[in-house]
Amino acid sequence: RGDEFEVRHIKTMFDLGRTRFVFYSPRDVDSMRNVIGDADIVINMIGKYYESKAPYQTKSFPYVGYKTNYSFEDANVMIPRTIAELCREMQVDNFIHVSSAAASPDSPSEWARTKYEGEEAVKEIYPWATIVRSTQLFGVEDRLLNYMAFMAAYYPVVPLIDGGHQLTQPVYAPDVAKTIARICDDPEKFEGKQVDCFGPSDYTYAELMEFVLDVTLIEDARVWNVPKQYAKMAAEVLQYQRDPPFTPDLVELMSEDYLPTMTADGYNNQKGADKIFTMEDLGVESTPIEKVAFNYLHRWRKGGHFTEATGYH
């Protein structure tokens, strides 16, 4: 949706003529219709972890106000519903909607609640859509491990909400991409089905923080146990930054476990037509976080990844 220079590096990942980039606006249905065109499969991966805001001038102090550009309702419900309606109208064969394992109608996080509402909207309009639910993603540009390293490197305090005892089971982003590609190989098999993507192990946020500090060698980071109510107060201010590291809704999301729908035994013991598929069912082996994290976290080391080697000083 932005400038051409924001996507030009992606063009080199395809053979010549195998991709095209078409401008669209979620508020311009005709532009979305042009993007879908004659597609056989449509994959919706639109999302936002915070509500984008724009400043505007006011007549009274402090003379600046903020208006929401795209809300969670817009990004997670309205846009998926519109895409599903267009897919049905244009008779697209298959629609894959990427959601989240955190999606729940009872979550304290508005982001998670609207993710669930978006799923329901898609199912109502396009019942044979495939729903892909992933846990938190880790990878080169993730907002999980990189967020922890960023906070440790640049902020005086790294907050762990209520001690960081909540569990999460992160999944490697390329594994999720590979899973979606496998679905596209045989989309009819997964019509109306749910596919869950998750990593091989669960961790507490405190354990992940300790792991990140061990890899990045940031020894002077101050990791504090911050009660949820105080974390939300800090987030009320930090949310106005560009790509905010912390928002009130993120505090709510990280105050609960972020895990798959079932345990490993639960997935294996499923029977019947309502079976929830996993990456393993599609032949994708989940990558351990310890295997790849160093490849992109070492850049947070103050001296780079050569500080532990001899002969470079």
Image (cartoon, rainbow, N blue to C red):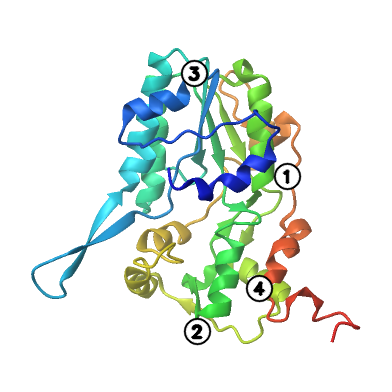
- Amino acid at circle 2: Pro
Residue plotted at (75% across, 57% down): 292
Q: Is residue 272 left or right of residue 227?
A: right
User: Looking at the image, can residue 230 be seen?
Assistant: yes
**Label located before the other in sequence (1 or 3):** 3
Tell me the crowding category of disc 1: few under 14, some 14 to 19, or many 20 or more residues within 10 angstroms, Cα based: many
Query: Hey, what amino acid is under mark 1?
Result: Ser
Residue under pointer 4: 300
Residue position for label 3: 128
Residue 117 at least partly seen:
no
Residue hosting label 2: 156
View extreme (top): residue? 91
Q: Quadrant of the C terminus?
A: bottom right
Q: CA distance from mark 1 to mark 2?
A: 35 Å
Q: Distance from label 3 to label 4 (Cα)?
A: 44 Å
Q: For residue 218, which numbered disc appears in the image?
A: none
Gap in angstroms between the C-alphas marked 4 and 2: 16 Å
CB atoms of marks 3 and 4 within 8 Å: no
